[in-house]
Image (spheres, helix red, strand yellow):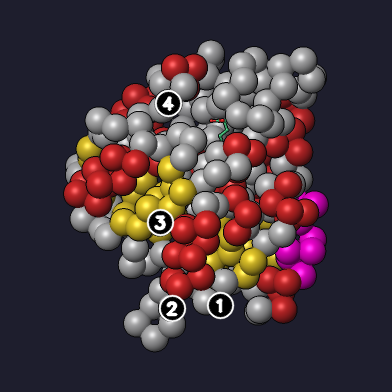
């Protein structure tokens, strides 16, 4: 995770961002600390990278790397405003001792568009990540990739429209939550085939970035507005855990966007 010390909305690269609306950086920091402390309270280890001045979106760490089995694929941003973030994270991985580290040649916004189910990597495209980055991810990470097409500009990253609730195990299939309307008709059919038991989100769930959740297989961290989705998840045996991320949502990000998962 990356503290939002230099967070602001000073450019527009998604429909959530409006530089004419005020942003409270101190409040963003308090909300982010609450998210970090929530993970720690749930028993997870959190590492922090040092934020850089001039990179207001660096708080959205999910966009800077995909780590599976200790193998890292870095990122390459579509927007020039965010391009420099990738190198800061690359250096962080090197300092932390990650040895199997590759940087992509195609536009690749990492976990913004990649979701690991435990067996396959679901890969979004349509707004940010280049479809050719999907093949590159398959080759670099050595995991099967399934391409999914996003069609609604408000849900510009896969992680705004889909998240994994529980990874696949030897005896249970992966469970996901997604917002069907964010995807093309063909992709909706793919998702129905792959995940017949998925938790389906509606417009209300999606529009507070409720589908930008983070699950450890039991606890599901959600924006505080997403109580209806939380109730449906509770009915499936999950434990909703709410955080207020309203300030960061002004840049189009939720809990997952702030969180890059380091899969050993
Ligand atoms: N302002 C950032 C952008 O548009 C928000 C990124 C949110 N991150 C995410 N994983 N969806 O790039």
- Measure the C-alpha gap from mark 2 to mark 1: 9 Å
Residues marked 2 and 3 touching at CB (< 8 Å):
no
Q: Nearer the viewer, residue 88 or 18?
A: 18
Badge 3: residue crowd in 10 Å (few <14, some 14–19, many ≥20): many
Image height check: is 242 above or below 194?
above
- Measure the C-alpha gap from mark 2 to mark 4: 33 Å
Q: Is residue 107 magenta?
A: no
Badge 4: residue crowd in 10 Å (few <14, some 14–19, many ≥20): some
The magenta stretch spans which residues? 223-231
Q: Upstream in the sequence, badge 1 or badge 4?
A: 4
Q: Which residue is mark 3?
A: 122
Q: Nearer the viewer, residue 248 or 45?
A: 248
Q: Which residue is mark 1?
A: 197
Query: Can you give x and y, in whole percent of width and height, for residue 207 in the image?
Result: 73, 47
Q: Which residue is mark 2?
A: 173
Q: Residue at x 48, y 27 (%)?
A: 50
Which SS class for mark 2? loop
Q: Residue at x 77, y 15 (%)?
A: 20
- Label at residue 185: none
> To which quarter of the image does residue 84 belong?
top left
Query: Can you give x and y, in whole percent of width and height, for residue 222 in the image?
Result: 68, 55
Residues marked 1 and 3 touching at CB (< 8 Å):
no
Badge 1: residue crowd in 10 Å (few <14, some 14–19, many ≥20): few
């Amino acid at each position: 995770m990356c503290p939002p010390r230099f967070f602001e909305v000073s450019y527009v690269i998604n429909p959530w961002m409006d530089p004419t609306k005020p942003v409270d950086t101190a409040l963003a920091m308090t909300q982010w600390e609450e998210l970090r402390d929530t993970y720690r309270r749930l028993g997870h280890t959190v590492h922090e990278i040092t934020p850089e001045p001039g990179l207001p979106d660096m708080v959205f760490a999910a966009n800077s790397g995909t780590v599976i089995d200790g193998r890292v694929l870095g990122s390459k941003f579509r927007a020039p405003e965010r391009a420099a973030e990738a190198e800061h994270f690359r250096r962080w991985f090197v300092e932390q001792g990650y040895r199997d580290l590759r940087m992509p040649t195609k536009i690749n916004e990492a976990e913004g568009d990649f979701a690991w189910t435990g067996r396959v990597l679901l890969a979004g495209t349509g707004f940010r990540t280049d479809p050719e980055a999907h093949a590159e991810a398959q080759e670099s990470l050595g995991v099967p990739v399934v391409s999914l097409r996003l069609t609604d500009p408000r849900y510009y990253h896969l992680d705004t429209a889909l998240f994994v609730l529980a990874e696949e195990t030897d005896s249970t299939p992966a469970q996901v939550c997604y917002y069907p309307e964010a995807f093309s008709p063909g992709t909706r059919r793919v998702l129905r085939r792959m995940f017949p038991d998925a938790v389906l989100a509606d417009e209300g769930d999606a529009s507070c970035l409720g589908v930008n959740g983070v699950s450890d297989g039991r606890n599901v961290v959600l924006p505080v507005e997403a109580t209806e989705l939380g109730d449906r998840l509770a009915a499936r045996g999950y434990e909703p855990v709410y955080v207020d991320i309203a300030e960061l949502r002004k840049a189009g990000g939720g809990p997952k966007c702030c969180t890059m998962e380091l899969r050993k």
